[in-house]
Image (cartoon, grey):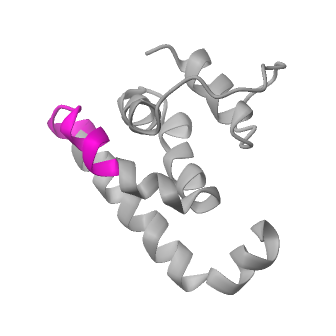
Amino acid sequence: MITDDLLTELTILGIPFLATHKCGDRAQMMPATLLAGLALDPDARVQLAIIARLLVRPDYASHAPRAVSMLPSAPRLLLMRYCAAAALLQKKYAARLNGLLG
């Protein structure tokens, strides 16, 4: 997957993470494909977008098992760790996140 495609998808989904260009207004990737693509990206900054995506849209966590099944060992472990990190951050900062994101 191409990094630019992943960043475009994130921008469309409301996370202008590292994006510097305009995008369309409809998401194109399935959630599991996006999570897997982010985990496979060689850029650590792009990989960290997994946490941002899960904080903004916790429902994406339900797609993590599918994404994990699509990945080889190292990216699989990365995705699992970042999902756990996002879950812990959601729990720790639930009130703040609710105030920011509604």
Q: Is residue 74 highlighted in magenta?
A: yes
> At 58% from the left edge and 17% from the top edge, which residue is drawn?
5
Task: Give the total of numbered labels.
Answer: 0
Looking at the rendered image, the quarter that the C terminus falls into is: bottom right
Q: Would residue 52 be visible to someone looking at this image?
A: yes
Residue 67, quarter of the rendered image = top left
Please, which residue is most extreme toward the left here? Answer: 73
Residue 24, quarter of the rendered image = top right
**Position in image of residue 93 (x %, y %):** 62, 81
**Position in image of residue 55 (x %, y %):** 59, 61
> At 50% from the left edge and 13% from the top edge, which residue is drawn?
2
The answer to whether 55 is drawn above or below residue 11 in the figure is below
Please, which residue is most extreme toward the right here? Answer: 22
> At 22% from the left edge and 33% from the top edge, which residue is drawn?
71
Q: Nearer the viewer, residue 18 or 67?
A: 67
> At 60% from the left edge and 53% from the top edge, which residue is drawn?
52
Looking at the rendered image, the quarter that the N terminus falls into is: top left
**Position in image of residue 46 (x %, y %):** 54, 35
**Position in image of residue 53 (x %, y %):** 58, 50
The stretch in magenta equals: 64-75
Assign the magenta stretch its main secondary structure: helix
Q: Is residue 79 highlighted in magenta?
A: no
Q: Would residue 82 be visible to someone looking at this image?
A: no
Left or right: 59 in relation to 23: left
